[in-house]
Amino acid sequence: MDKSTNTNTQQFFHGTKAQLKQGDLISAGFNSNYGKQKQAKYVYLTATLDAAIWGAELALGDGPGRIYIIKPTGAIEDDPNLTDKKFPGNPTKSYRTREPLLVMGEFTEWEGHSPERLKEMKDNIQRLKEQGIEAIED
């Protein structure tokens, strides 16, 4: 984790299609929303709304995308799926943890990406999948 990130004062988000309520815990151990959907060793969070919107829009499922305001219950670390490969220095403020995330509430005042931008992202993910490149590496 970036040494300047204080998990007690920083606001964090988790984008998903799961319907959750305040007080629920988001835990590792369930099938991932991405890649081969294997059992996830981590749960992911972000300090940027845009990254949470992508999470909500790209998650598997038929329901609407949802963004939750969450609080980590343990240590977090930079998400190497983004920071090491795509965005050195973690400008997306994307993190992961093995500890549960506590749902503090739902963030409802967000607007998704344009249909064209969303299609572009999904097409890119499909190209990577066809090349055998996983979206998430645990």
Image (cartoon, grey):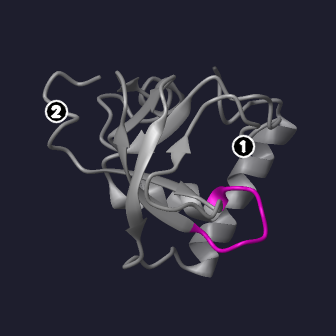
In screen coordinates, is 131 left or right of 18? right
* Residue lying at 40% horizontally and 76% vertically, measured from the top left: 110
* Quadrant holding the C terminus: top right
Which residue is under mark 1?
Answer: 34
Location of residue 63 (image quadrant): bottom right
Q: Secondary structure at mark 1?
A: loop
Residue 116 belongs to magenta span? no
Residue 59 belongs to magenta span? yes
Q: Position of residue 96 (x, y in %)?
A: 46, 30
Location of residue 133 (image quadrant): top right
Q: Is residue 128 above or below residue 48?
A: above
Which residue is under mark 2?
Answer: 6
Disc 1 marks which amino acid? Tyr
Q: Earlier in the sequence, mark 1 or mark 2?
A: 2
In screen coordinates, is 57 left or right of 22? right
- Neighbour tally class for label 2: few under 14, some 14-19, many 20 plus, Cα within 10 Å: few
Q: Secondary structure at mark 2?
A: loop
What residue range appears in magenta?
Answer: 58-65
* Residue lying at 50% horizontally and 38% vertically, measured from the top left: 44
* Residue lying at 32% horizontally and 53% vertically, measured from the top left: 48
- The Cα atoms of the two marked residues, 1 and 2, are separated by 28 Å
Q: Is residue 77 above or below residue 50?
A: above
- Of badges 1 and 2, nearer the viewer stands 2
In screen coordinates, is 5 left or right of 29? left
